[in-house]
Image: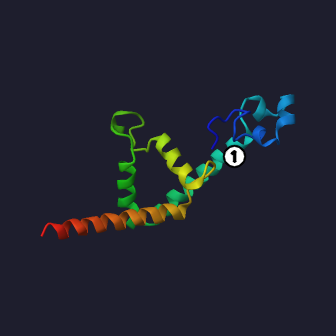
Amino acid sequence: MALWAGPLGPGSLWAQGTCATVARLGTHPLVSRGWAYRDDVDRAQRRRSWARAVFAIVGRPGLWPTALRQLVRSSRPGWWRRPPFLPRPDPAYLRFRLETQYGSDGAPAPADLVIYLAWCRAEASANTAAAGSTRR
């Protein structure tokens, strides 16, 4: 994902050298409005990837409590005070996490999300068991 998605941004087709002639002429509608085609395609691919990831979780009811717990844990503090009144992760935090996992153009892989949530569930169970054994 480009930090600046304008026609001269690092993730744009201009930066790749494939759109320079069209941009100089200003005839391509995506370039003339100031946005590169690649960023629009990347956005659509990320949305599809998120949809597949959500459907992967929907098909595994055993992970639902863990998914909700992780969603609330990664949400902004005081999310209930600001519209849209949903526990959504901070966009900057999410962008950072996805970029460190998948690179600058990456999107979440459904299998990775399932594995992560299964790991979170196992860790929570292990921590609960360990806490129970130290109380005795």
Relative placement, left or right, of 88 versus 81 is right
Residue shown at 76% from the left, 35% from the top: 30
Q: Is residue 96 left or right of residue 37?
A: left
Instruction: Find numbered disc 1 in the image and state the secondary structure of the residue it sits on.
Output: helix
Q: Residues within 10 Å of mark 1 (few under 14, many from 20)?
A: few
Relative to 67, residue 28 above or below: above
Q: From the image, which quarter does the N terminus lie in? A: top right
Which residue is labeled 1 in the image?
41
The quarter holding residue 89 reads top left
How is the structure coloured here?
rainbow
Q: Residue at x 66, y 47 (%)?
A: 42
Q: Amino acid at mark 1?
A: Val
Q: Nearer the viewer, residue 13 or 62?
A: 13
Figure quadrant of the C terminus: bottom left
Residue at 43 percent across and 44 percent down: it is 88
Classify 107 as above or below 18.
Answer: below
Q: Above or below — where is 64 with respect to 23?
A: below
Residue 23: percent from left, percent from top: 82, 32
Q: Position of residue 109 (x, y in %)?
A: 56, 60
Residue 32 lies in quadrant: top right
Q: Residue at x 49, y 46 (%)?
A: 94
Which residue occupies the foreground of this view, 34 or 84? Answer: 34
Residue 90, image x, y percentages: 45, 41
Q: Position of residue 57 (x, y in %)?
A: 47, 61
